[in-house]
Image: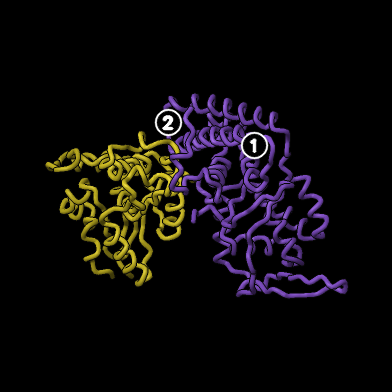
Chain colours: A yellow, B purple
Amino acid sequence: MSSVYAFDDSTILNIFVLDIPKGFRYKFNGKEKFKSKNKKRINEFLFKLSEKQIMPLRFTNEQNSIWYPDLERRTRKIINKWLHPYDLTFETVGGIFSANIVLQMEDFFDEINDKFESIIKSKEDISPIKTFFEINEKELTKQDNIPEDEDCEIILTYYNYKAEKDKYLISADEHFWGYKEEIKKEFNINVVEEWLCDTLTVG
Amino acid sequence: MCKLTFSKKEAIYFILKNSKENYISSTTKLNKILARLNLHLMPINIEFHLNKYGSYNPELGEIESNNLWSINSYTTSSGYSGKSIKLTKEDLDIDNKISKKMERSFTPEQIIEIKKEIYSMSSKSAKDLSDEEHKKLLVDIENREKLIFRANSNECDYLDLYKKVKTKQIKNFDEVKLKGLIEYCFELSKFLKAKIDKLPEDEYDYDENMNTYYYLKILEEAKPFIEKQIDSINDNKQINLLCEFLIRRDSGYPFSIHNENYKDLKVNS
């Protein structure tokens, strides 16, 4: 039996590569692709998992569709980060380009569904989790101090997930890594910062 | 290549898999079946050309035997030589890829219809298919004035649709795709109108213009569907298919996001 490794969707989005069609490259000084700086590290770690035949986990909504509001929000966030240096946003870059992004993302998540095991997010009451973070509130640098409802749903879902060995959660979200000691102690989940995942020993 | 677009290998495999006895008696017939898939807007990564009769000719090149199918050369008693194709092996991996693409683009009923059509076409002679083809694939070569009228009215209709969505609050990614599709159709309708306006009066260049007529036909046929979706999206698969066929597929047509001069081809309103 091996440990289990879950990725939050923001980290999964960081392995997505957006191809810029030739007709739009003039908007981005001839750039051909957008990708996240941690992509290589995450892929290296995923490769390690596949070598050991370990299926990574991801958290999804029950509905039978690629998109749900939180994933759309996270997608806009990453796209806006890429477009920001060009004074553009998902909303201002143009309808055809935005539609093309969504279509490429759908291809991407189609592949992800084959490569990751989905855990349906729990619909149970998350208020105890929320309260836990309120009691143990910390000063975060990049985010609001208290994790969002979607983050609490992930914690609750993963906490309830049955695993023989250790549970790891790979994330770039400060709501997780900012509370890594507390999460480990209370929920027995090992949070690993996304940019350090390639240093993890798999087993 | 885009994910929904079929590779040449996948398209031929799909046809053989659904043909009578997994067999196609000639490459001419294979061409005709591939061309017919275009009527379903099934995006295939093969360049198609339209001839002056409005028939598609796929640029298949030389097809050779491989691990999935075998090619047999034959010569008939009347001296006609040709090549038949027989599926020799089923491949689960390709089957899965094809199923995924089909399911993202078509309803289960549409998939059954396409498979039935392939089966039926594979049972007919190339001559029968040719007669059918001209009825089904023919793009009417109408007089210049009528074409200009159609292109004008098509542009006006898409302008109306574009105005409707331009200021509409976008609630989710399905609506992002629809808005992008309408914007593209509007831009394409302007391009087509400009192109048809410039048609020479004294000569008629079929090779140059048949794609223009074909896209005009697709836009006209797609309009009622797109209009219905503005108030409430109820057919995401058809939207995916139109996006794939019109926007993402690299068809070789100049007005394409894959053309680096795309922005210069846009026509100002």
Whether residue A191 is visible to the viewer of this picture, yes or no, is no
Closer to the eye: label 1 or 2: 1
Q: Nearer the viewer, residue A51 or B242?
A: B242
Q: Where is residue B215 in the image (x, y as percent from the top left)?
A: 61, 40
Which residue is denoted by mark 1 in the rendering? B200
Chain letter, disc 1 residue:
B
* Tag 1 and tag 2, C-beta contact below 8 Å: no
Label tally = 2
Q: Quadrant of the C terminus of chain A?
A: bottom left
Residue A128 image label: none
> In whole angstroms, how far apart are the C-alphas of marks 1 and 2?
42 Å
- Residue type pointed to by label 2: Ile
Instruction: Give the letter of the chain under mark 2.
Output: B
Residue positioned 48% across, 27% down in the render? B269
- Figure quadrant of residue A163: bottom left
Residue B259: x and y in percent read 47, 48
